[in-house]
Amino acid sequence: MGAGWSSEEERQPLLGPGLGPAPGAVWRSREAAAAALPAAAPGPGRVYGRRWLVLLLFSLLGFAQGLVWNTWGPIQNSARQAYGFSSWDIALLVLWGPIGFLPCFAFMWLLDKRGLRVTVLLTSFLMVLGTGLRCIPVSDLMLKRRLIHGGQLLNGLAGPTVMNAAPFLSTTWFSADERATATAIASMLSYLGGACAFLVGPLVVPAPNGTSPLLASETSRTHIKDLIETVLYAEFGVVCLLFSATLVYFPPRPPLPPSVAAASQRLSYRRSFCRLLSNMRFLMIALAYAIPLGVFAGWSGVLDLILTPVHVSQVDAGWIGFWSIVGGCVVGIAMARFADFIRGMLKLILLLLFSGATLSSTWFTLTCLNSITHLPLTTVTLYASCILLGVFLNSSIPIFFELFVETVYPVPEGITCGVVTFLSNMFMGVLLFFLTFYHTELSWFNWCLPGSCLLSLLLILCFRESYDRLYLDVVVSV
């Protein structure tokens, strides 16, 4: 089954034209959804044990993509000495991630037209090419730097799929009481991969010591370069292994749908965009997602510079970023599991998370102004406020994804999340580009965090939630 390529028929409703919601139906209320259902609807769908294997393969692919994307940031000083990277090179290696989202709409179209298997295979193949380019042995440092940049760009092009396809996968393979959990696992593993890069790189590659003539010698430079290439070869091997596993077994969909929502026909690619752009509720919640997470991503990228005036080292700043992402992944999966048990609570969960994010960011900002506020400025307070902020914001991502899909159903999941992540990454890319040139004074940036979190909290508070996809499954099940 896993060897078959998906086709146009994958996009057709599995229950037939008389057993699901009408194509293009818009659920405005529970009464409208109930009226659109047939008199004799089938019971719940069937789930397969292999769904966890599919989820594992996709999640590991996202983990590898995040790991490759963040290869150079934690070892930037060593990379400067080994390959002659400039500050602009280091910034561009990070920017290839957001830049990779420019053709995001092409991947959304591919996911909508050709299905999950083809899109995932193309994504993993791009990652194989990208990590392979970085491993080509050349002596010319200029050519080597260009190959590394090209490899990072190809890996960045894999970002739209690993970020957008998680809700599509959970709907295709998982029942209604497991969807949020599957979405959280598939979407959070990419962030966890980026966090693990803070451990893998520094553990393998030593930091150069400019004060030691011995470490500045050609022998030391060669040694550091060899260790960096060891990391590159290891990442290439992992990506090749995942591509091989995906090629051997990654079915486009299960034989029978897990729910009525999974079997229902969705809007076309063109109509989906018209629906999204004309839906004010969707635009409101999309801004509530994109603005604070875009600001947080830009703030995290210069966290070591922000903490330097308060005497926090680059190593400590890296550990703060690591634990905030890991904590966000754990809490995000736990919150998603809670949302599966207690359905219809996504808005309340987001309100709680962003209330915590607003308080944590305000605490951090006021702590940095201890000369005015007289709040205790210690390593514990800085660690606590930063890590709590990252936990609250990162754990909101899968909850947002599920709420997006519920809000605009029957728009396909890949298109919905693709538009939102494109907006967020473009916002993050602009901030990172701006901060690359204007990073001398960053104290104002601390105020952007509580301001963006508070704005998002107000947008969520004013948002009128609906669960049309979930209600469809519940009504048919009954």
Image (spheres, rainbow, N blue to C red):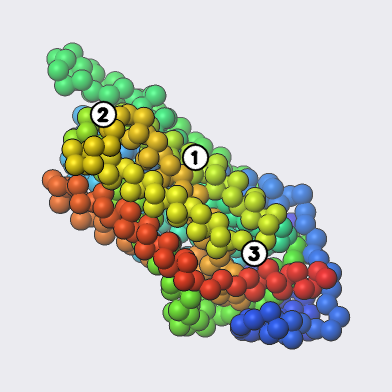
Look at the picture and state if 456 lies above or below 81.
Answer: below
Which amino acid does the dot numbered 3 rest on? Gly
Who's the residue at 68% across and 46% down the image? 53
477 or 65, nearer to the observer: 477
Residues at marks 1 and 2, CA–CA distance in whole angstroms:
21 Å
Residue 344, numbered circle: 3
Q: Which residue is mark 2?
A: 313
Which amino acid does the dot numbered 2 rest on? Ser
Residues at marks 3 and 2, CA–CA distance in whole angstroms:
43 Å
Q: Which residue is mark 1?
A: 327
Give the structural element (helix, strand or loop) at label 3. loop
64 vs 8, left or right, is left
| Crowd band around label 1 with a 10 angstrom C-alpha radius: few (<14), some (14–19), many (20+) | some
Q: Nearer the viewer, mark 3 or mark 1?
A: 3
Q: Position of residue 246 (x, y in %)?
A: 61, 49
Who's the residue at 74% across and 50% down the image? 50
